[in-house]
Amino acid sequence: MKFRNLIDLDNLTNDELMEIILLSDKIRKNPSEYANVCKGKILATLFYEPSTRTQMSFQTAMLRLGGQIIGFDNPQNSSVAKGESLKDTLRVVGGYADIIAIRHPNEGAAMAGALYSPSPVINAGDGGHLHPTQTLTDVVTLYNEKGRLDNLCIGLCGDLLNGRTVHSLIKTMSHFKNNKFVLISTRELGLPNYIKDILKSTDTNCSFIEIPTLQEAIPMLDVLYMTRIQRERFSSEEEYQKQSGVYVLDTEKMKYAKKDLRVLHPLPRVDEITVDVDDDGRAVYFEQTVYGMYARMALIMTMLKNSNKSVPKTLKSTYKECCSNPKCITNKEKYLPKLFIEVGDMLVCKYCEHRKLIDY
Ligand code: CP
């Protein structure tokens, strides 16, 4: 496999993705065979934002592979509190550890960190942008629960604007044939246009429709991916309250769903799925968390096999101005090179994928 860092699941070809899915299955079915494969290796988990599943499943994954772990789950307990830059933190920790998983509130932070880390970097969530290892978890779950990654009708419900797991999942599933995405959200929390543009230009015959209510959408779905309204991404509590509680999956709505529907949720759940749905065999969100641990074991094994330590070459800016997305990491860590690519008449930021018209 060619990839050094995992910033976006798009860094992998479909074949590479399938290899990791199949390896995670092998590990799940025979864990003792893999109990020492990472002996002597160290994983650093740098979590600048709260997490239960991602952080602990990464840590458990490394421990179950025989490796060890270091890191922080609160940057205020690290030298970040003294003003240390992302660059310096990654340059140093990448010297201690063999592989790093980073979660950060700013979009593009994992890519930025990877520019300076001597060890490979995994994006464990960068603001509202991407969450590729959640997507790996999701595709491993889908492969096991549905037996395929193509020809699926996938409903995505809730906060499609801020839900980074949704963005990553759609991008990845659009590489497989004939998937149909049913977008269920309020107008305010709709899918960003750049993801819709990706869906409009696939060569895999994927498509999307937008349906405003869960009642209307549920009968047609093979998969329902529920999401939490991301309170922490709203500018005020008042704005959040307007959106909260609009979509709730309950046992009544489940009556109208297919018998082989699978309900996924990246968790944590707030109030968007009532607890009685947990007893419905079609709800697989707790199984999903376990698939995620095996998926991360397979990912760590694969990345460590490919990697050797080296300090990356310094990159030069390709544009004079900063990204216009205020949540982009380049607006926080000002030393970062300004990296854009031209797509038609748009400039796309390589860190956060924010687009703006080229100013000729
Ligand atoms: N799904 C997920 O990312 O959960 P955590 O925020 O608990 O890691």
Image: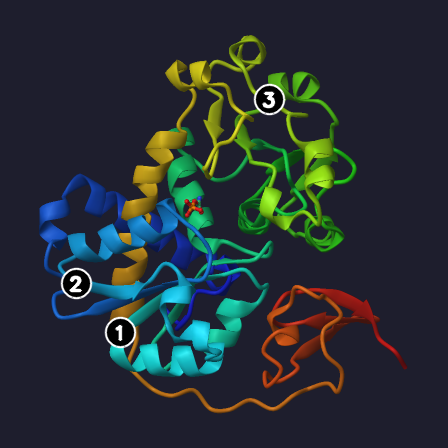
> In this rendering, does residue 115 appear at all?
no
Q: CA distance from mark 3 to mark 2?
A: 41 Å
Determine whether label 2 and label 1 are within 8 Å by CB.
Answer: yes
Q: Quadrant of residue 38?
A: bottom left
For label 1, being within 8 Å of ligand 1 is answered no
> In this rendering, does residue 250 appear at all?
yes
Name the quadrant of the N terminus.
bottom left
Kind of element beneath mark 3: loop
Mark 2: few/some/many CA within 10 Å (<14, 14-19, 20+): some
Kind of element beneath mark 1: loop
Q: Which residue is mark 1?
A: 98
For label 2, being within 8 Å of ligand 1 is answered no
**Picture disc at residue 67:** 2
Mark 3: few/some/many CA within 10 Å (<14, 14-19, 20+): some
Picture coordinates of residue 140 (x, y %)? 38, 42
Q: Quadrant of residue 128?
A: bottom right
Q: Which residue is mark 3?
A: 248
Kind of element beneath mark 2: loop
Q: Is residue 240 left or right of residue 101?
A: right
Q: Is residue 267 left or right of residue 321?
A: left
Q: Is residue 178 left or right of residue 38?
A: right
